[in-house]
Each structure stands twice: as structure tokens, then as C-alpha cells.
Amino acid sequence: MSDTRLQIRDDRHDALSDSDFAVIHGFLSQTYWAGNIPAETQRRALEHSLCYRGYIDGALVAFARVVSDRATFAYLADVFVLPEQRGRGHARALVRAAMDDPRLQGLRRWHLVTRDMQTLYAGLGFEALSQPEYHMQRHDPDVYRRNDRNG
Ligand SMILES: CC(C)(COP(=O)(O)OP(=O)(O)OC[C@H]1O[C@@H](n2cnc3c(N)ncnc32)[C@H](O)[C@@H]1OP(=O)(O)O)[C@@H](O)C(=O)NCCC(=O)NCCS
């Protein structure tokens, strides 16, 4: 069941405020996938993504972003809901809003990476890679911490 109080906004409504950026960076910089991400890197990532923000009573409680050429491919990233607002369908509603964005229709592939939330995305039509051996990556999971240490 989705909580109808969630208001979803993106850049077509308004620009990201500094206080919302602080909530997003505060959360993501503590996650297993973006731990220690510098604020400047985070800001650049958001500036070059389609960002979807979920609000309850004017406060940002949920976030997701999409990196896309807006023609063929989209990568869904950085999905989160603040702990006190979980279990109410907000993540599902936010990801659905991204997938319904008119700028992201007719794509050949949506992609994402998740350690443990496969059920969330399975409910939205995502499935495990059918031929994982066809996919390759260059992955540098320690890049933020290393750059942090090196000043
Ligand atoms: C993952 C996260 C975004 C889910 O947010 P949420 O608003 O609670 O999720 P929803 O209420 O929309 O749940 C939708 C579906 O996702 C799945 N799901 C949600 N939380 C789950 C959990 N903790 N464990 C397993 N499945 C879960 C369920 O299938 C759920 O459907 P159901 O309620 O009908 O069973 C939230 O727990 C979170 O921010 N976690 C920390 C950050 C994170 O791990 N992000 C995902 C990175 S890929």
C-alpha cells in the first residue's frame, strides 16, 4: 500500500535546495555503496542526473536518481527512504515515478545494482541478469576513501 501523502518532485518542479542536498549527501555518504563520497562529487553526480525527491509535509524523506542518455538506456541509483518512513511504499512510488518520467520512455534497457533489495525492484519489472557473462565492469569501490586519505 502506498502512502498518498508522499509528494514527488523533480527538476521540472523546482531546483534542489541546499538543505535537501544536505539530507541527501548526509544519507548517501553513510551507505555501503557511496560511503565517504565527497560533497563536491555528490553535487556533480546529482547535477548530471535526473533526481526524484519524495516529501512528507514538506520534508525530504526519499530520493532516487537516474543516469541516462534519455533515448536508449537508464541507470537507477542512490535509492533511499529515511528510516522512520520505510515500509509505506515510498521507494516503490519513487522508482515508479522515475520509470514513468516522459523523458525516460522507450528505452532499451534499465540497469541497477543492489546488494539486498532485489524484491523491491522485482516488483517493478527488474530481473537478474539473464547472461551475466555478457556484462563487464570497471569497479573502484574504495575511490572516495582513498582520495579522502590522500587529501
Ligand atoms: C530499500 C529502501 C529504499 C526501501 O524503502 P521503503 O519505502 O521501505 O520500500 P517500500 O515500502 O516501497 O517497499 C516496496 C517493496 O520493496 C521490498 N522491500 C522493502 N524493504 C525491504 C526490506 N527491508 N527487505 C526486503 N524487501 C524489502 C518489498 O518487496 C516491498 O514490498 P511489500 O511492502 O509489498 O512487501 C529503504 O529500506 C532504504 O532506504 N534502505 C537503505 C538504503 C538502501 O539499501 N537502498 C537500496 C539500494 S539498492
Image (cartoon, rainbow, N blue to C red):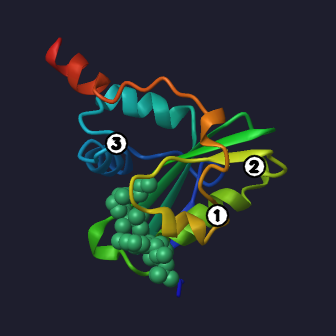
Sooner in the amino-acid sequence: mark 3 or mark 2: 3
- Element class at badge 2: helix
The disc labelled 1 sits on which kind of residue?
A: Ala
Q: Which residue is located at x 37 percent, y 45 percent?
A: 21
* Element class at badge 1: helix
**Which structural element holds mark 3?**
loop
Image depth: mark 1 or mark 3 in front: 3
Q: Is residue 150 above or below residue 74?
A: above
- The spot of residue 128 in percent (x, y) is 59, 55
Dividing the picture into quarters, in which one does residue 4 lie? bottom right
The circle on residue 33 is: 3
The x and y percentages for residue 131 are 66, 44
Total numbered labels placed on residues in the image: 3
Q: CA distance from mark 1 to mark 3?
A: 23 Å
Name the residue beneath numbered marker 1.
97
Residue for badge 2: 104
Q: Position of residue 150 (x, y in %)?
A: 17, 11
